Image (spheres, rainbow, N blue to C red):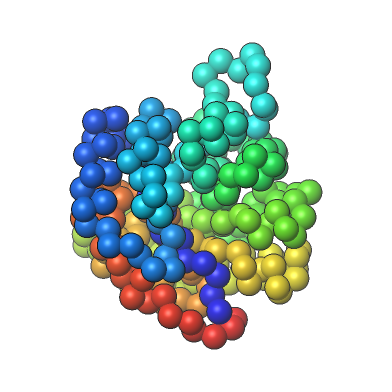
Amino acid sequence: MKPQTIIAANWKMNMTNTDAAAFAREFKRIYKGQGDVKTVICAPYTSLSVLTAEFKGTGIYVGAQNMYYEEKGTFTGEISCAMLADIGVTYVILGHSERRAKFGETDENVNKKVHAALSNGLTPIICVGETLEQRNAGITAEWVMGQVRSALTGVDAAGAARCVIAYEPIWAISKGAVLSGDKSLVATSETANDACGGIHNVLKDLYGADTADKITIQYGGSMDGINCTDLLAQSYISGGLIGGASLNAENFSEIVRKAQELNVPKGVY
Ligand code: PGA
């Protein structure tokens, strides 16, 4: 069996509180309950309370896009795990490439955040991925595996089984996928699956097959309602972390719906 399919929206710095409430109402209208597929909306901090209230009792989960690992104190501008958990947030994106590249997020910080998230009952969505230069230099596997190992340093098998890994090749993020017409900018399903298979192998190496088989590996990088079918059909891809195509309730719902259609047992790895 593949691990739990998880389709997560990453709104990034988009959507005001008003927009978020409108999205939630529209999404609830369209969303029919998506069977075994878990749906998560990772929104800006300002909209999290509104979303947890709107989605209460619907089976739709809410996530943050970052947090700080300390419990409380003199960390102006930061948000703790307890603050997120207290308002009903259950997921948190950690180590997104935009945070690594634009806000100095390090492997060491990501690891501390993973520990803090797990101790507070949050599910970390740990993002890893290579630049185009790294891919062209042939070091994708080494780089991505290194990111996975460092994010999970000191995490035991029970903790790892609660994590989600998002493979997001940096060169494929925000390219608008099929809609842009330039497919060369987007990872092919095979390329994405190769990298996700490599991640699965590292997890197996670290924790054994039983644990590795439980860990959802998402693909992120211009997944949309068209290319999701191919991507999600791959053996090692069990979900998506979706930016641009998640900002519209109809578009995002299409991905969730297609994931559900595909979500039939495909046998073991
Ligand atoms: P994208 O973003 O779907 O717009 O490429 C994905 C992400 O960065 O999480």
Residue 41 placement (x, y as % from top left): 39, 47
The residue positioned farthest toward the bottom in the image shown: 267
Q: Position of residue 251 (x, y in %)?
A: 23, 56
Residue 171 visible within the image: no
Q: How many marks?
A: 0
Please state, as top left, top right, bottom left or bottom right, where the N terminus lies in the image: bottom right
Q: Position of residue 219 (x, y in %)?
A: 46, 61
Q: Is residue 178 visible?
A: yes
Rendered residue at 66%/45% (across/down)? 118
Would you identify the image quadrant in which residue 187 lies? bottom left
Tell me the residue at 24%/31% (across/down). Answer: 18
Is 143 or 196 nearer to us in this picture? 196
- The answer to which image quadrant residue 255 occupies is bottom left
Residue at position x 63%, y 56% in the image: 162
198 on left or right of 55: right
Q: Give 250 or 10, whichever is nearer the viewer.
A: 250
From the top left corner, tell me how far across and down residue 229 is, in percent: 33, 73
Query: In the shown orientation, is residue 182 left or right of residue 204?
Result: left
Residue at the location (54% across, 85% down)?
267
Of residue 62 and residue 181, the one placed in the foreground of this image is 62
